[in-house]
Image (tube, rainbow, N blue to C red):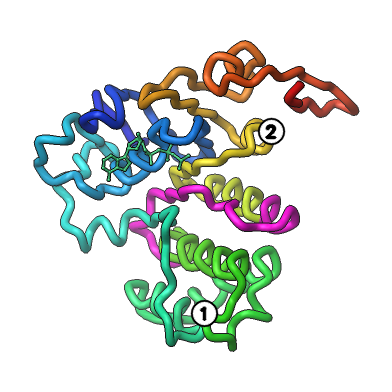
Amino acid sequence: MLHINALVIKDRLGPISGELKAGRLTLLIGPNGSGKSSLLNALAGLNLAASSYQSGQIYLKNTCLSTLSIQQLACTRAMLAQDSVLPHGLMAYELLALAAAPLGGVTKAVSQSLARLEEPLGLSCLYQRPVNRLSGGEQQRLLIASTLLQVDPRVNQQGKILLLDEPLAGLDWQHQLATLRLLREYAALGLIVIASLHDINLACQYGDDIWCLAQGKLVAQGTPEVITPPLIKEVFSVTVARLEQDGASVLVPI
Ligand SMILES: Nc1ncnc2c1ncn2[C@@H]1O[C@H](COP(=O)(O)OP(=O)(O)OP(=O)(O)O)[C@@H](O)[C@H]1O
């Protein structure tokens, strides 16, 4: 359990309080500038050093994240940042080997963990290619793989938290759905998984819990039912209708 207590980032976020549970996929939605990246960065323990710009505490069980060293943080959580840049000059397999370095290198268990990601993320055709010559979506698939690998509890028993800022950005439909299925799978392994998404329908379809931010405040949280047309109108200034078909429910802008 990740317990957030009155988190404030001056002029950007909060106060935010809440709990993120292990074993559940929490999806973060909200308009541009509503604070999703700021919250994810804070949960990753970035900028948590005593700063006049940030206050509040984030506890993982009984441990305050700000007391962890950067090495401990690196083993405990993995974060896919929105502006991740791949280092030039590396082959894709070398990038994954780098991600595996804190896990003791590409051991048999790490290879098995990677093998489970190969098909859903379409990795096998990328391994032997220089990362700077991959398309945007191919780079994103590689970054998702390296992020998941770092906290797979089957290879890293200290891995507890998986944070992804707009993991679906640049992905085609097939890989968007595959990524969401993987996030559910990793949550089912006992991780705390939180990701920001701009697709509200996918968030409601795949999220166990939804957190909705507006102007730095948490305006709705709970199971997907909390996301209603009136809330969308209030937060996103968009009028939507709910369409139901074959047991599925989607929100459509009208
Ligand atoms: N480094 C920074 N310094 C000061 N203000 C910042 C900084 N980064 C972001 N902000 C501001 O903080 C607020 C929240 O930004 P944030 O990036 O967290 O939003 P977001 O919900 O992730 O947006 P988007 O959907 O556009 O990615 C915005 O008003 C933004 O302008």
* SS of the residue under disc 1: helix
The residue where tag 1 is placed is: 131
For badge 1, the amino acid type reads Val
Q: Residue at x 55, y 14 (%)?
A: 234
Residue 210, x across and y down, in percent: 54, 29
Residue position marked by numbered label 2 in the rendering: 201
Q: Tell me, yes or no, whether the highlighted magenta stretch contains residue 164.
A: yes
Say if 88 sits above or below 23 in the image. below
Number of marks in the rendered image: 2
For the magenta stretch, what is the residue range? 155-178
Side of 249 relative to 196 (left or right)? right
Mark 2 sits near ligand 1, with its Cβ under 8 Å away:
no
* Mark 2 residue element: helix
Q: Quadrant of residue 116?
A: bottom right
Which percent across, then down, holds residue 38? Answer: 34, 40
* Disc 1 within 8 angstroms of ligand 1 (CB): no
x and y percentages locating residue 95 in the rendered image: 45, 78
Mark closer to the chain start, 2 or 1: 1
Q: Residue shown at 15%/35% (left/top)?
A: 53
Q: Nearer the viewer, residue 155 or 217?
A: 217
Relative placement, left or right, of 109 versus 43 is: right
